[in-house]
Image: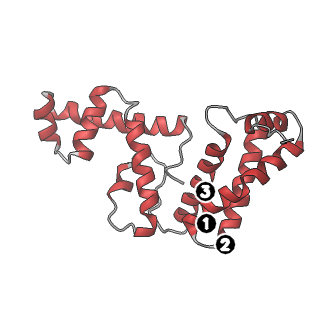
């Protein structure tokens, strides 16, 4: 008779309720997949092991603090944590540009840096993908200016002509778009900066 497999979500709930063994089952179940994912990004066994350990430390802390929500699958959530830690590693080692989180921070400067090497193309693509998703949360007038400026490379004069508003209004919309993007990143706890 085949032994039934307990769903990840059940194991997570049991762990949160105090059953330490449930985390051990989750750990064993997903260890190889998470480790392989990390290794495929860093190509270093010791570093992969360190990031893997950090990933599960973060998983444990998040679960213990009650900050885990069941929006997606457990494995996707853990993979996202591992992915963010890989990006953090590359940033700390100055393999991609570091940005201070200030009011003048412009996430698009990450996308425009031509010095990023091929090894970090994956990170650049991921940031690009995240930013595109975040842009959809902006009001239409801000989204329009931002897309014209960063994706169509138009000047503010050209944007003004296309949208039928003054250059100052276009500049204002861009400013608010960047402020709103910063707030969305902060509220959604997305790691695009150190």
Q: In this view of the protein, which residue sits in the foreground, 127 or 193? A: 127
To which residue does mark 2 refer?
45
Q: Residue at x 76, y 51 (%)?
A: 29
Compared to residue 29, the image places residue 42 above or below, namely below
Left or right: where 83 falls relative to 45: left
Q: Residue 121, located in which quarter of the rendered image?
A: bottom left
For the residues bearing labels 1 and 2, Cβ distance under 8 angstroms = yes
**Mark number displayed over residue 39:** 1
At label 2, counting other C-alpha atoms closer than 10 Å, the crowd grade (few under 14, some 14-19, many 20 or more) is: few
Q: Residue 15, located in which quarter of the rendered image?
A: top right
Q: Residue at x 83, y 42 (%)?
A: 2
Circle count? 3
Q: Secondary structure at mark 1?
A: helix
At label 1, counting other C-alpha atoms closer than 10 Å, the crowd grade (few under 14, some 14-19, many 20 or more) is: some
Q: In this view of the protein, which residue sits in the foreground, 144 or 164? A: 144
Q: Which one is in front in this view, the residue at disc 2 or the one at disc 3?
A: 2
Compared to residue 44, the image places residue 72 above or below, namely above
Q: Quadrant of the C terminus?
A: bottom right
**Mark number displayed over residue 85:** 3
Q: Which one is in front in this view, the residue at disc 3 or the one at disc 1?
A: 1
Q: Secondary structure at mark 3?
A: helix
If you read the primary sequence from the N terminus, does the residue marked by circle 3 or circle 1 appear first?
Answer: 1
Q: Residue at x 47, y 35 (%)?
A: 183
- In three-dimensional space, the C-alpha distance between marks 3 and 1, rounded to whole angstroms, equals 12 Å
Q: Residue at x 62, y 31 (%)?
A: 71
Q: Position of residue 175 (x, y in %)?
A: 32, 37
Name, please, the residue furthest toward the left.
161
Q: Position of residue 88 (x, y in %)?
A: 57, 58
């Amino acid at each position: 008779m085949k032994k039934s497999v307990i769903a990840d979500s059940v194991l997570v709930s049991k762990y949160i309720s105090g059953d330490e063994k449930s985390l051990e089952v989750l750990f064993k179940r997903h260890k190889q997949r998470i480790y392989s994912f990390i290794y495929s990004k860093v190509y270093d066994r010791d570093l992969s092991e360190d990031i893997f350990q950090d990933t599960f430390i973060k998983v444990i802390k998040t679960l213990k603090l009650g900050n885990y929500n069941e929006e997606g699958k457990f494995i996707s959530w853990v993979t996202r944590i591992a992915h963010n830690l890989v990006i953090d590693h590359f940033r700390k080692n100055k393999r991609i540009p570091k940005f201070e989180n200030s009011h003048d921070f412009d996430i698009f400067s990450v996308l425009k840096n031509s010095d990023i090497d091929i090894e970090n193309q994956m990170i650049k693509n991921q940031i690009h993908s995240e930013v595109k998703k975040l842009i959809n949360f902006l009001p239409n007038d801000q989204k329009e200016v931002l897309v014209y400026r960063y994706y169509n490379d138009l000047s503010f004069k050209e944007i003004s002509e296309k949208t039928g508003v003054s250059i100052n209004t276009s500049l204002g919309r861009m400013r608010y778009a960047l402020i709103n993007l910063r707030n969305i990143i902060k509220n959604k706890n997305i790691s695009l900066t150190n």
